[in-house]
Amino acid sequence: MAVDLQSSRTALLSAAARAAHLTVDDEPFLFRDTVAERVLGSTGVEMIRYHRQRGGHPIPANTRVTATVRSRFAETALREAVDCGVDQYLLVGAGLDTFGARARSSLAVSSSSRSTIRVRNDGSGSAFRNPVWMFPAPCVMPNST
């Protein structure tokens, strides 16, 4: 994977914060994005270095917390939705989100953003017929009685 030169600054900063979280912050980690550093490539080297050099400063620390909590929240909501039967995930404005590359399930994943990363892990290569728009919301199961 490579970063498109058109990736937004916000996408780059968020991916760098998620990548740095694993090397700068102590366990337990809020979120494990093991792909973010590779996605950033040479573009993110300096951004990640900044986090490593100034890890304890409130501004980069807050950036890491914000990026990792946001990703963890979204993926927790997605797991709950999958438990309720959702089988497609459309990321709108995904930036450099790496969920599609990290996901290990039969969930069909597609993204829409200014970057070139477009990941589907269902292997079909076909377009979505009925994409499901995922919003973080509690899952309501029908009464089975």
Image (tube, rainbow, N blue to C red):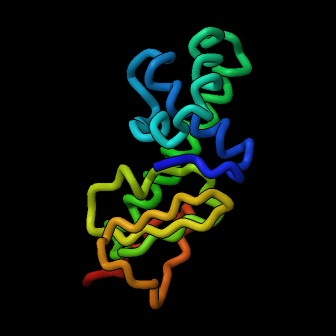
In the rendered image, residue 16, in percent from the top left (x then y), is placed at 58, 32
Please state if 52 lies on the left or on the right of 141 as rendered: right
Image coordinates of residue 10 in percent, x first then y, are 72, 43
Residue nearer the viewer, 94 or 44:
44
Residue pictured at 59% horizontal, 17% vertical: 49
**Residue drawn at (52%, 53%) of the image:** 74
Question: Is 144 in front, or is 32?
Answer: 32
Q: How many marks?
A: 0
78 up-or-down from 3: above or below: below
The residue depicted at 45 percent of the width and 84 percent of the height is 127
Residue 110 is left or right of residue 94, and the answer is left
Q: Position of residue 126 (x, y in %)?
A: 39, 84
Reply above or below: 24 against 124.
above
85 shown above or below 44: below
Apparent side of residue 7 relative to residue 121 in the rendered image (left or right): right
Q: Classify residue 22 by image quadrant.
A: top left
Which of 136/111 is in front? 111
Looking at the image, which residue is at 66% across and 46% down?
A: 11
Q: Quadrant of the C terminus?
A: bottom left
Q: Position of residue 73 (x, y in %)?
A: 52, 48
- Does residue 135 appear left or right of residue 144 in this picture? right
Q: Which residue reaches farthest bottom?
A: 129
